[in-house]
Amino acid sequence: MSTTPPSIRFSPEADADLAVTEGTIVVFVDGEGALAPGAVRLDKAMGGALTRSAGDEDFKAKAGAIVKFAFPSGTAARAVIMASLGSEPGAVAARKTGGAIAKALGKGAVTIATGGIADDAVVADLVLAVALRLYDFREYKSASDDEKPADASREITVLADRPETLARLSAPHAALAEGIFFTRDLVNEPANRLTTDEFAARLAAMQELGLEVEILGEEELEKIGARALLAVGQGSASESKLVVMRWQGGKADEPPLALVGKGVVFDTGGISLKPAAGMEDMTMDMGGAGVVAGVMRTLALRKAKANVIGVVGLVENMPDGLAQRPGDIVKSMKGDTIEVINTDAEGRLVLADALWYTQETYQPRGVIDLATLTGAIIIALGHHRAGWYANDDEFAAAFAAACEASGDDAWRMPLGKPYAEQIKSRKADVKNTGGRQAGSITAAEFLARFIKDGMPWIHIDIAGVAETSSGTDLAPKGATGWGVAALDTLIREEYEG
């Protein structure tokens, strides 16, 4: 069972009588505290309550500010929410305000009166933000009727001056919301449910959306020499796999953009066993693969006019009598030998073979990999931004612009020879960790060895942003789906004709 975004429909605001509308009604004030047209009409029914609240010295008409009225007299509504987009109603304000509205919603239907907001794109962003913040993963919850989620069967009606235009602008947002929800579901799943087999099956099911999906098992991976990837999973009962998702929406002869994701469905650390405290969070160590899957789903749903390959390496890192050991030396598909210093630095081994296979097989125009790769990036950037690395400034500029436009915050980190020196091995071509200092950078330098000369490449370390412990404007506590919006934006702006 998958979590689905709320149903959203668009109607002319001029035809609506908010005084007799049931459920929750959302109206707006501008940055000066002036009521929007829908709010003016509703204010009369409420005896001026909105005007008084907007004029109260405690109310600041800034982005994300709301006032909620429960069972207001003069209306049929369960609640009325008065919200502000502030004095600069752009995409940032829309995301902040939409998230605040969603957090304030109770049960039942929702009507959002957006008439008077001049920019339809801002309204579309606001509606997307509401939908994303309403995500609620309840697959394993047993609850009475009284405890069912507030949005179990929610319908959202958006009243607008130009509903047809707004519906057209919101269509790709609907696909994006489904992609983000798909990623969040994958990341939130427990490892006893989301095995490598189950993960691969969910990706294979997307063939009905028009994706071509190919699954390589251990026998095929052995034949192509993907020993670095296989070594990570050799201590697990779950079969290691490489899954390829192909979306061919562009010209037949146009090389694809490649997205590559780390899919460690559970990470014990292997023989280099992690501490028990917090190990339960390692169900999210497949977050990079989850983002790739969500992007591919989004592209298929909105019929993107681009060629994109999504490749994910699916493994489980477990300690048993067959598990790889610290000190082992494995040979990658590229042919480089790798000394395994720490079996908990396993994601880069998975990506090494996945990256090389992708380049050898599909000759992409550029490669982006995503992984919950290091704790070091959390030390550097906290849980506020992803860290990313690039070998091509033009590619980097496009990605940075996509991050800014989508709200997926990220920070470019350095690469360089001194960091590569840290992972030189006495016994092999390279070792899989360079120690604690600059740990995220040396991991990126490790991956850089498996990028062909002249291939534009970006590595994104999402260890700090794949999950949130307190919630954000767009996501409740748990999986965030970070990166799906940024990559979809990049593809839309740079790769679709």
Image: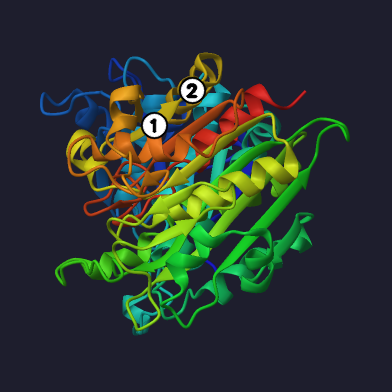
Judging depth in this view, the residue of 57 and 143 nearest the camera is 143
In the picture, measured across the screen, residue 440 lies left or right of residue 394, that is left
| Residue 473 lies in quadrant | top left
Q: Residue at 71% across / 33% down in the picture?
A: 164
Label 2 is placed on what type of residue? Answer: Asn
**What residue does disc 2 label?**
391
How did the renderer colour the structure? rainbow
Image: 155 above or below 304: below
Q: Position of residue 224 (x, y in %)?
A: 67, 59
- In terms of secondary structure, where does tag 1 sit? strand
- For image coordinates 72% across by 48% down, the residue present is 300
- Tag 2's secondary structure? loop
| Left or right: 119, with 438 as reference point | right
Furthest-left residue in view?
A: 57
Q: Where residue 353 sits: x, y (%)?
A: 55, 52
Q: Nearer the viewer, residue 464 or 29?
A: 464
Name the residue located 36 percent from the left edge and 30 percent from the top edge: 410
Callout count: 2
* Above or below for 233 versus 352: below
What residue is rendered at 70% in x and 61% in y? 206
Task: Tell me, yes or no, if residue 455 can be seen here.
Answer: yes
Q: Quadrant of the N terminus?
A: bottom right
Residue 285: where, in percent of width, then height? 38, 59
Q: Residue furthest front?
A: 427
Residue 215, x across and y down, in percent: 69, 65
Q: Which amino acid does label 1 sit on?
A: Trp
Q: Quadrant of the C terminus?
A: top right
| Depth check, front residue: 97 or 228 | 228
Q: Which residue bears the numbered disc 1?
A: 388
